[in-house]
Amino acid sequence: MHNEASVRQAVKGGGQISMLRTFRTSILQNTHARTIRAGLLLLILCAAIPGAPSEGTITKIGTATGVAVSQVSVTYLKSNWVVTAVAGSNAYLQLDSWQYTASGIVHEFTRTTAQPISRVGIASISSSRVVTAIVTSDGNLQINVWTVNSAGAIVTEGLYVAGAAQTVDIAKLSSHRVVTAIKDGNGNLNLQVWGIGSTGVVTPLGSATDIAVSRASVAAISNRQFVTAAENSAGNLQLGSWAVDGGGNISHQADATKGSITRVGVSSWETSGEIGTAVRNGSGNLELFDWAVDPSTGAFTLNASRSGGAVDNNIALSTMGGSTGELFTAAEDSSGKLSVAAWGYNGFPPTFGKAASLEDHLATYMSATYLSTKFAESVTASINSAGKLEVDAWSWSTP
């Protein structure tokens, strides 16, 4: 499974959008030059149809089930390790560490709390530390810092309770800073940079308040620049770019808007200066946009877009593991099943291999992250039909 031959080689791109197949479980070969922004944004979805064309194979390589949950978020910790943050028993915040081994996904440790929550996000800031951003049951934003040792044991370090929040997302800026994007008590987008001390002390740094939103996501482009993607009051996709100075202060750079949406996720590509947004558009279909973000002005340039199949209001977006930097989406499709896909640039006529098929499970909520920085592997954390946390690992390989 893990060999250098499975790493795709980069080629120059072409500049035309194309979609080859649309099915429930999906795959993509991404052969691209990330330093050259001409290219073909390509989604190849794998079918349960013998002999149907595809590029490579996406395979479920591990699965594990946890407790009954109502909220879920997952983050990469280090190679083959992820940490989930969920609303578990009594809606209490719970963290779990998971390792991918030759036996598949193995649960390593559970850290329970007595803090009831209504929303949760998690981001790793090093190979041994994660930060959670939660909306407590009484409607306040709370930041918690955690240490994860080599065996996966999770220990709390520090916390900070902030103001009113309705939704929350979090992204790493550096090993000692994170940024949160919330829908605040007034329904506006509120951004906050947080300093994370060596002993877990949480310090609020710069903040900014923006437009009224229904929900918002955040992704860092660098330690000095991040992007928000939100559904604005008109029901349209609204992007914002933001600069962070040495003191952690936030300044607004630029905005961009697109069509109507009812769900949005945002992630940076592996290459600095580009982001992807995945939305449920006004037609109820998954749509992914690739944007270039100017490092100085924050100006947005839409490079390409691609539509997928019908999805419900559950969408997760992250980078996919590996050196070629695809984006990975996980969504609840129109039949209520988990649908996974990889997206990237491919600038030459693709070589088709044999189609593959995967069994999907019913899922009502999902989060996604990468599993490795070297191999094309990702992890989804979802709520399955039994109402329990399900952690699945996925691998992409060439034909």
Image: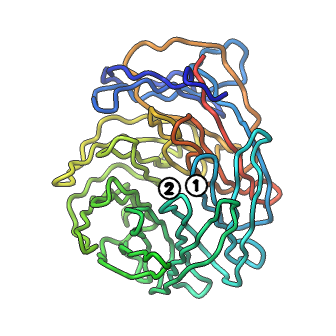
Residue 333 disc label: none
Mark 1, residue position: 313
Q: Tag 2: residue type?
A: Arg
Label 2 belongs to which residue? Answer: 263
Three-letter code, disc 1: Asn
Query: Image height check: is 143 above or below 269?
Result: below
Q: Position of residue 326 (x, y in %)?
A: 47, 36
Instruction: Identify the residue at horizontal 29%, vertical 46% (top origin).
Output: 273
The residue positioned 73% from the left and 31% from the top of the image is: 358
Gap in Å between the C-alphas at discs 2 and 1? Answer: 6 Å
Which quarter of the image is occupied by the C terminus?
Answer: top right
Q: Residues within 10 Å of mark 1 (few under 14, many from 20)?
A: many
Question: What kind of element bears circle 1?
Answer: strand
Q: Are marks 2 and 1 in contact (CB under 8 Å)?
A: yes
Q: Which residue occupies 64% across, 52% down?
A: 81
Near mark 2 (Cα within 10 A), the count class, few <14, some 14-19 or many ≥20, is many
Q: Residue at x 44, y 72 (%)?
A: 182
Direction from residue 68 to residue 245 in the image, left or right:
left
Q: Is residue 251 left or right of residue 343?
A: left
Q: Position of residue 102 (x, y in %)?
A: 76, 38
Which quadrant of the view contains residue 92?
bottom right
User: Is residue 201 shown left or right of residue 26?
Assistant: left
The location of residue 287, given as percent across then percent down, is: 46, 41
* Element type where label 2 sits in the image: strand
Q: Which is more toward the observer, 355 or 395?
A: 395
